Image (cartoon, rainbow, N blue to C red):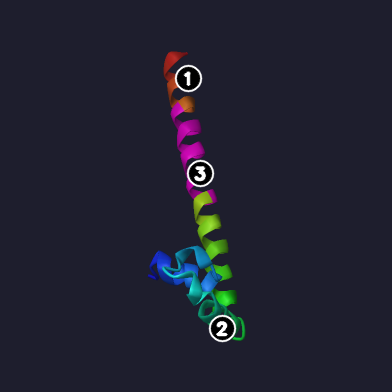
């Protein structure tokens, strides 16, 4: 998996730079990366991570609903 520093470079995030004079180099790298499949692949990862988080929330909600259903049945 890519470390956060590599992901920031891919995103063109200049807050990662040690020396602000490196900004031109980062822009060159970012411009080059835009001509590749990398931005689309990063977007695909982000979308998949969002879906995963949504699925986790849905599982948590379903478990809570199951728990409530069981407890309500036992109390009746």
**Image position of 58 with respect to 20: above or below:** above
For the stretch drawn in magenta, what is the main secondary structure? helix
Q: Is residue 22 above or below residue 71?
A: below
Q: Which residue is at a point 50% across and 55% down the rendered structure image?
A: 52
Q: Residue 9 appears at what percent x and percent y?
A: 48, 72
Horizontal side of 34 relative to 73 (left or right) equals right
Give the residues drawn in magenta, as a range: 54-67
Q: Dot 1: few (<14), some (14–19), or many (≥20) neighbours within 10 Å?
A: few
The disc label shown at residue 57, or none: 3
- Disc 1 versus disc 3: distance between alpha carbons? 22 Å
Query: Callout 1: helix, strand or loop?
Result: helix
Badge nearest the viewer, 1 or 3: 3
Q: Which of marks 1 and 2 precedes in the sequence?
A: 2
Determine the residue positioned at 41% across, 68% down: 18
Residue 74 spot, x, y in % from top left: 42, 18
Q: Point out which mark residue 28 bears.
A: 2
Q: For the residues carrying marks 2 and 1, which lies nearer the camera in this image?
A: 2
Among all residues in the image, which is located at the extreme top? 76
Up/down of 17 relative to 76, above or below:
below
Q: Nearer the viewer, residue 61 or 33?
A: 33
Give the number of the disc on residue 72: 1
Left or right, residue 5 beside residue 47: left
For the residues labelled 3 and 2, the Cα–Cα distance comes to 40 Å
**Dot 3, how many residues are within 10 Å of its Cα: few (below 14), some (14-19), or many (20+)?**
few
């Amino acid at each position: 998996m890519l470390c956060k520093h590599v992901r920031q470079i891919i995103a063109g995030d200049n807050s990662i730079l040690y020396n602000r004079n490196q900004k031109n180099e980062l822009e060159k790298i970012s411009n080059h990366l835009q001509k590749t499949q990398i931005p689309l692949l990063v977007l695909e990862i982000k979308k998949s991570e969002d879906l995963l988080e949504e699925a986790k929330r849905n599982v948590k909600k379903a478990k809570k609903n199951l728990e409530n259903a069981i407890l309500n049945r036992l109390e009746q």
